[in-house]
Each structure stands twice: as structure tokens, then as C-alpha cells.
Image (spheres, helix red, strand yellow):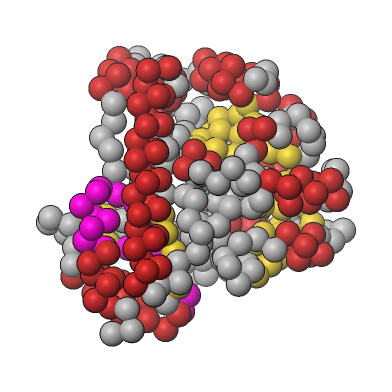
Amino acid sequence: MPAPLRLRPEIAALPPYRQGRPAPADGFKLSSNENPFEPLPSVVDALTSATDVNRYPDATALALRERLAAKFGVTADEVLVGSGSVSLLQQFVLAAAGHGDEVVYSWRSFEAYPGLVVVAGATSVPVPNRADGGHDLAAIEAAISERTRIVIVCSPNNPTGVPVKAAEFAAFMDRVPSDLIVLLDEAYAEFVTDAGAVDGSTLLGRWPNLVVLRTFSKAYGLAGLRVGYAIGSTRALDAARSTAIPLSVTAQASAAAIASLEPAAEAELLARVSALAERRDRLRTALRAQGWDVPVAQGNFVWVPAVDRVEELAGILFDAGLVTRAFPGDGLRISIGEEESVDRLIEALGKLVDA
Ligand code: PMP
């Protein structure tokens, strides 16, 4: 046995990232909240036209930032792009939290949060979700201490699907210390149909410590290209600029993202988002009618609380060609994919309720 490497013990103990299993033949991969639609031809054209691969990309992806700034009515300095929004999350955590510092977030939520905090050498303060799967903002506020460096609010929450209410979030922002960065992780914002849910794009400029995180991975279907963005005050974004790995957004990714924001392309992409939201609502309604206690679902996924049956259900669904994400002891997260997958889910889960 070779001697163990001289690693930070907390890093050596971190579990590796769990990627969903590939879909079996004639099956559906519904485990990573991906967009099932193929990329638009105009987006593929833009991607393949960016052939200057012997050159480094523009370090700050200015063209993409300008395009996003125009869309959201802010300046390009108030937009930061990164290699997926998970990379931006890490940049903020690294910038603000080190040894002895705390990062507060609702739990269960996006699986990456605890790992990012460990990598920073900081301490997670997970605050239990409410029984309905939503954030308990009063409890999150109560968990903030002198040592808190970042608060992450995820709306709609992955994996439960429940959004934070706009009024509750505004009241929360008014109460939290104004020098504490609040990351509003809105990876699934475009799928939200509840008018009462928070929409970070309407809050820009209101609190200098608020940073809204969004991504091209979900609604825009570019998960494989890795482009996310943060919108916030220049001062808040500066922190994350300092901890970025330089040049991590490729010219190809920028070109595809810009092409996705062209009016005709974006309209088509958002029509697909509406179709996915309808499938989501159809699936949730059907599962609730079968007796599954599926909470409010506002992302591109539904959450099936199943406690001690999670792995059994995931296994049976897998055998039916449906790859889902199991959270043992808690629930099953099912992404909204092809129309046919929704029919197959309704049929398969219908046989399993109380079985
Ligand atoms: N935030 C949440 C809540 C997510 O679910 C995800 C992806 N699963 C991300 C951020 C990261 O997305 P990406 O890095 O692809 O932008």
C-alpha cells in the first residue's frame, strides 16, 4: 500500500460528484435537470463558427456580459459570467468564507453547496426546509451570526421545487446585515409560473449585497457548454472576480449563449420552457391524484417524497427505462424531459403508490 498523499483530510473525505446514470436504450435520463430539446440550429452555427481555438477567449466575456446587461437593464460591470453558475457559487464562497467562517443555506438544497463550503475551509450551517419543502426564511435569518459570510437562497429550491415568495424575500433582504452577501440561486428562474414567487431580475439595484445567479444550462439548454452568470453590484461581483480561474468561459460557450439571446432564438427557447412547465404541471397533478405528496413544483423537475422507499422506487423506475435522482431516506427528484417520459412516469408511479 503506498502511503496516503498529504491532502487536507476534509478534502480527501469528500464524496465525488454523483452523475446520473446514462439512459438505457429506449429510456429517458431524468436525473440531472437537463433540457431534453436539441440545440437550435442558430446556436449550433454560432458555436461552430467560433473556430479561433488557438487563441484564448476574451477574459471577461465582454460581448456576452453586454448582451446580458442590455437584457436586464444593468451595466456590463454588474454582470459576471463563469463556467456554469456552480463555478460562480464557488467563487463567491471562496471570496467571502474561510476557516472559522460560516455559510448559511436551506437544506435539503442543491447538492454542491456543502462541498463548496468544505473546499473553502469554512463551515456549513444548514437550516432545515419547512415541511412543504420551501425555505424557512425566519430560521435562516435566525441562523445568521457574526461568523456568517454568505447566505445562499435557492428559488425554486433544487430538489424540492418550491420557490421563495417575493414579499417574504424582500422582507428578509431588508432585515439581513447589508454587508452580508446573499446569493439568490435562480438556476430554474425561467420555469417559474407562480406570479408570487421571487424574481431576482426585478430586484436588481435594490440591495447592494444581493447577487442573483442564473445559468444557460437549464432553460437555454446549454448545460454541456458551461455558462452561468451573476448579476449584482460591482462591489459584490468584484469579490468573485478575484477568485475566478481566468479564461474559464470559452469563446464557443459565449457565442452560443449570445446566439440564444437573439430575439427569435430566445422566443423559441422560452416557448420550449413553457412546454416543459406544462409537462411538469401535468405530471405533478397526475401524481398527486395518485396519492403522491408532490410539493409545489416550479423548476424543471418534481420531487416525490418517499422516505424509506426511495431506492426501491428509483430501481423500479430504472427498470422501466426512467433514470431519476434518488436522495436516500428523503425523496426522488424527477426531471421533466420528453413528453413520452411523462406518460411513462405517470403509468409506472401509478402502479407503485402504496404497492
Ligand atoms: N444551482 C442550482 C440550484 C442547480 O440545480 C444547478 C445545477 N444542477 C446549478 C446551480 C449549477 O448549474 P450550472 O453550473 O450548470 O450553471
Asked where in the image residue 217 lies, by quadrant, the reply is: top left
Please name the residue shown 40% across and 72% down the image: 292
Q: How many labels, in total?
A: 0
Q: Position of residue 260 (x, y in %)?
A: 40, 24
In the image, is residue 104 above or below residue 185? Answer: below
Q: From the viewer's perspective, is residue 301 above or below residue 143?
A: above
Q: In this rendering, would 202 be left or right of 19?
A: right
Q: Residue furthest left?
A: 25
Specify the quadrant of the image occupied by residue 44. Answer: top left
**Who's the residue at 55% across and 57% down the image?**
162
Residue 121 in which image quadrant: bottom right
Residue at (34% x, 63% y) in the render: 286
User: In the rendered view, would you say 272 is above or below 72?
Assistant: below
The magenta span reads 324-345
Observer able to see residue 137 = yes
The structure residue drawn at horizontal position 20% and vertical position 52%, both measured from the top left corner, is: 340
Task: Tell which of 84 and 185 is nearer to you.
Answer: 185
Left or right relative to 38: residue 73 = right
Compare residues 98 and 326 and report the one nearer the observer. Answer: 326
Query: Does residue 28 appear left or right of residue 46 in this picture?
Result: left
Residue 293 percent across, percent down from the top left:
45, 72
Is residue 304 within the magenta segment?
no
Point out the residue furthest to the front here: 289
Quarter containing the N terminus = bottom left
Taking the image as drawn, is residue 315 in sight?
A: no
The quadrant of the picture occupied by the C terminus is bottom left
| Magenta highlight on residue 344 | yes
